[in-house]
Image: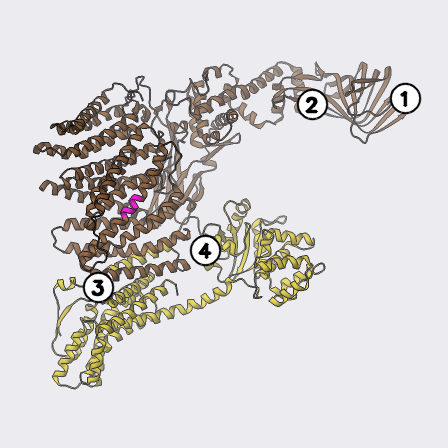
Amino acid sequence: MGKLRLRDWKDVASSAGVYALLSIIVGSLILFSSVYFAERIQQPGGLACTITSKSVFERVISNGSKAVMFSSDNCPVCRRMEPYWKQLCEREPGRYYILKLNEETYDLFISYGVLETPTFIIFRNGTPVARHVGAFEVPHGQSVASAMEAWVNANIKGSSPQEALALLNKYCSSCHTVPKGTSREDIESWISANPSDPFAKRFAQAYSQGITLSQLYNGTSGLVGMILSMNNTIPLEDAEKIALFLDNLATNRSGEGTRLTAPKTQEENKEGQTGETGLAAMSAAAALTAGLIAAFSPCVFPLLLSYTAMLQASGKEHGLGAAVRSGLAAAAGVGLIGVLFVLLGSTAQKINSVLVPAAASVLLGAGVLGALDIPTFVNIGVRTRRGLTSFSFLYGILAVQCSFPLVAGTLMLLTAGGSLKGVGLIVLLAFILGVSAPVSLAVAASGRASLRRLLAKASTKKALRYANAVLAVMGLVMLAYSLGLI
Amino acid sequence: MELGLHYAVILPYIGMILTLAGTLAAASGRRDSAKLLTAGLAVLVAGWFVYMIPFIRLDYTLAEVARNANNDLPLSIRAATAWSGGGGSLYLYTTMISIGILPLLASAWRRGEEPPRSFLIIAGLVVLTAFASALLNGAFDVNPRGVGGLGLNPLLKNYWIIPHPLTTFGGYALLIAGALVAVYTGRRLLGMGVFVLGWSLLTLGIMFGAIWSYETFGWGGYWAWDPVEISELSVWLMATATLHMLGPLAPLRRGFLVATASTALFAPFVTRSGLSPLHSFAAADIGSAILLIGSIALLAIAIYEISGEATKIRPTLKPRTPAELADTSITMAGAAIAVMAVFVYASLLVPGILNLLGKQATVPTMRQGVEFYHPVLLPLFLFSILWLPGFFLARRLGVRGFTGLLLTELAIAVILFLAVKKGTVNLLPGAPEATKLQVAVALPLASTTLGAILTALADALYRKARSRARDVGLILLHTGMLLAFVGVLFSGTYAFNDRFFHTYTLTPDSRIDTGIVSLGLESYKYTTYKGTIDLKHHLSPNTLTAASAWLGIQMLANDLGTAVREVEFAKSQVEANTTLRALTDLLVSDGFYRLGNVTLQSTANASIQNLTSSTITIIATNKNLTLTLKNTTLIITLTPVTGQDGGLLGAWVVSGMQAGEAVIRGAALPGRISFHSPLQINMSTPVTVTLGNNTSLEIASLRLYPASNNTVFVVEGDNTSIRGGVFVEIANATLHIGEGRIRIPIPTGPGYYLLVALERGDLEELNRILACEPLRGILMNETLPARVLGPNVGELPALPEKAPSGLALDLVLKAGVGGSEKTIHTRIRFEANGEAMGIHGLVTPAVLIRKGLGDIYVNVQPPMVDALGEHYHEPLVRYARHVIETMPEDEALTLVAVMASGYHISQLSSVDTNHIGFLAERYIASLYVAADDNTSAIDSEGLIVMVKYVPGVNLVWAGVTIMAITGFVLGAIYLAGDRRA
């Protein structure tokens, strides 16, 4: 076995990259811990029932059937209705929600056409399928809460376009013309064929401007009221269904009758699933690159070269078996340390969301510094004795220690990966491969000049700079990934 | 301003004279000027300690004591009243400047040296300016009558009054003193040492002010961009900029030192002028103008110095070596901080000057402040912190290492910004989008800088450099700053915005669950203060409060008082007369009789009276007439008579009948009767209609009207029948009630009308007023107004000299957070002087429950009490009750009137002067009625509790404290350096 001897700290001190990388490590750990806490700040009053943020709302309605009360603080009817809706929420959590109007959620009110509060909308996988504006009329002997519940239960599925068209025919066709279908052609042919029908005219007005009929009537209650006034046999529920249907129809040019947000949600769902495999692939690639860089870094590589020179000088031929064995030994050296971190990672699941972006930042930093040709390694001298296997094992450990700051990033990755079942292992293996493959190559190359030349070329400054630039980009991509940007 | 002789002013006057003499001597080049000046300053400093004595002893013959103190302040706060008012604080300021200058003068005296003339002159002028402003702000006024104290402003009455002004003013003073010493004498190290000590004090002072605001005002914020806060910040920024004038910027340091002195003279001006709603107790006047003029003079000198040196600066903008990198970094940072300082100072100076010239000018405050200052200060601040690693790690990083670091942190910031913009990272839930984006950029830059600076710290600790202590201190200082900044990023938006509050009601024995903390009320107790305040001599008749109280009492006496007296008079009459009593009972129960068919027969004269032309058409004379009314209802009622102004003049007891049909036998009507031409029947013998219950109406004459336009007249011979409804006005009758008789119709006074309405259950408000004994007593008392109202509006001779100074509501709360249960004692205070001054006396301190690095911020408010449609918070009602129960009637009335007016000062200030009386009358009456109830609304309605979570705020305090402590150490190192030299 060889002895490890730490060279003078002054040499450490000359390593600008080390200081920069240390700053980045500490800084990114601080940053992403802060981000972790900053995302989880909870204000009082918001139990699961009340939503005050846009992202929470979008997450909530994205799947399943949800009944949401769009409410604002200064509206007296809202204040009357809210306690009852809250009762339902507490009784049946996960179905009823209250969305409060504030600076952040204002956009949601606009995009769902909520011009008056309270407006109750039932969402099904992100699409509004039923809508009611204002207070709930209470039949004799019932309570407001049960009236609300009854409405939700009756409308939880919403009405299909066919049903809505049937309603339209049933109530309106005696005095007005109605479109034959919901496709764009149907709508446009209906509008152009009936220029004097006031219903078609009004609809055309909204359709051409891309706004809902509700907006034309200054609010859903205006539209519903107008429908009710047309025919005094229309029950309120049906009028509301017709209103919602017409609104959707007017703003949907593609003729599918669904809100724009729905398709996006589906895409996002798909993305969520591919996200994890993507992350694993990125991590593995980054780890492999890091391993290679570690192997070719100026502090490790000379060792390798000198040892191969020594091997050459010894005259012995090392066959494939020797190459493989030495590679495995190096792998074992790296693996020893790597496994520790993977184990550490499995107990640190919670800090995964901190470690992954922090690790990505460190890799980014290491890559940037390396690309700028700034040394990021620590010189540790090793005196070795004979023994290929033992050297390789030692080399493995050395490779880790020598480029410690760089490796730290990778090791954080391993720690983070530890909580992603299987991914941690992949990352570890990738890193090991990166570090130990050159050893195998070097051993195998001790007899082949061409491989030696290849190795020599790979260790030039320029190659290393390019490799670091690639690492930087990988780090950037990983960071973006971990924050959900791509 | 009333100058006079008092033992506390002797030393200050002597000190001033000596200082003046010393300054003049220095100006004329005399040799012993330094000694004169030193003596003067020393006397001024000694004089301060004597000056504090009357405050501690509550000697009201010194006017400042009377204005600020009263007898229920604890000793420590009594001492603090010496600097809580305008004049006193400026004298403290003068003293501390002197303390900052004396070390130089003293050591020069010891060494036998003569300080430079320029220094003596400027130092003397600065001290004299400060002294003059103290004098003009009333620090040395005497109060020969020695009448009692008004007490402190309610919000100032807590322990923060001690550290905050001392550190803030101490900071300003030492900054000025240090600057003058550093610039105008050769003792640079001494000057800088004092300057750095001043900087550290000011850092603490600003933090204390922020914590004070955070704990006391209850809105959860610690920075409101109030002009006073901005002025503190302007001094701090200028001082910080000065400390960064190193390396290439070093030639500018002189100028910036003087500029700091300018800001430090300007800040008390802002505090005392009318620029701030928070701190001003006197409008801009000559006393504060002197400070402004002084600061402008210093600013001119500063600009002169800076412009002289500016051309000599050679900054390295393209560094190639670590040394050059350090230079570039300090240049960049220094420049950025200087721009921030100038920007903030200018934002105050311009309105300040305009204000003094009489023009309206405001400084952007609160949300406007956020929109004005943040877009400028935040980018500049972020720019300056980027260079921290370039300075502290210059040798380690080198230029390329620094570049790599910069590129990395900027890349991380961009990614985080994009992620927050996209919405996949939800920083600070509930915050506005703009804030989230700003934090998304600021947090990575601050974190990486923090990482770098911690690396620098480790590096500095392990190196064995000689300047290790100083290096470590400096790095720690910047670490503290970064920690505070991160704390601000977390807490800022939640602290500043009160929409994060969630409101609950808390009754005893109930529990609120907010999701982050559960709260319960264990007990509550009201205690009246033992101390008193003197309103008689301190509430000026010119104030709106006094005027409203006066007008309200007058209206009370004339309006409600008259009404009540008349009701009582009517009541007494009715009680004395059984017939009247019987009539009243009849009227109260709606004298309404269904008579079916009524026949009246008598010898009578019938005529048609044309009321418009006043002609009479005689139908029958002395004929035997029979009038039959079918389906008749007889009503006896009381109709009010109102005057042109709507006032109640009186009422009439009248009677009438309604019938479906009328048949007159014996008179044939020639034509229609109408509403203007009724049929009048005068009976020679009155006919009695029995109403039952010992009641009958003896009718002598009546008038018949048709009930509508559709009435049909049928004349058959000598008989007329009128169908379609008739109305009969009983023009002359006698009502027999029991044993008595009453003429109908009969007029009554307004009191009687009110009495009947009251007994009927209408006039609920009047009922409540009468039910309230103390108020009723006042209203009945005709001589009371004369005793209580002076001849001119606002003069209130019965204002008490010893009004109770207030009361406290002590609460014991239980808070459950994270599994553990805490007991919290808190006190809601009501200070009467605040209400009287129109600045409101209710102080509801925040209850802070530590959660991690943040606070669960709980603001507890007392419930409101309703009376007569007005509402008051319960402590005021309790106070009024106490006053009414314990004080003589006239004093109580005046005090309650003042309280009610003060409470409603904003409503009263926005109405027409003619309406003030009416409004004030309502307020006074309602406060009396409210105070009549002994129960507490806390039991029925509960306390109003507002809760929000302010994350990371304790990191702000921790960071700033680290800055201040390391600053003190560094200052001490400077001074030690001076001592060795």
| Residue of label 3 | A17
Q: Which residues are magenta?
A: B337-342
* Residue depicted at x 14% and y 77%: A306
Residue placed most toward the observer, A335 or B191: B191
Circle 1 chain = B
Figure colour of chain B: brown
Counting from the top left corner in percent of width and height, residue B79 is at 26, 29
Q: Is residue B159 visible?
A: no
Counting from the top left corner in percent of width and height, residue B660 is at 80, 29
Residue placed most toward the observer, A310 or B215: A310
| Residue of label 1 | B718
Circle 2 chain = B
Is most of the magenta stretch helix, strand or loop? helix
Instruction: State the SS at label 3.
Output: helix
Q: Nearer the viewer, mark 1 or mark 2?
A: 1
Residue B587 versus residue A79 in the image, above or below:
above
Task: Using a 10 Å C-alpha cutoff, classify the residue at mark 1 as few (fewer than 14 neighbours), some (14 to 19) or many (20 or more).
Answer: few
> What is the C-alpha distance between the residues marked 1 and 2?
34 Å
* Residue depicted at x 45% and y 68%: A270
Amino acid type, label 4: Lys
Q: Is residue A446 left or right of residue B758?
A: left
> Which chain: yellow?
A
Residue A234 versus residue B754 in the image, above or below:
below
Amino acid type, label 1: Asp
| Residue of label 2 | B637
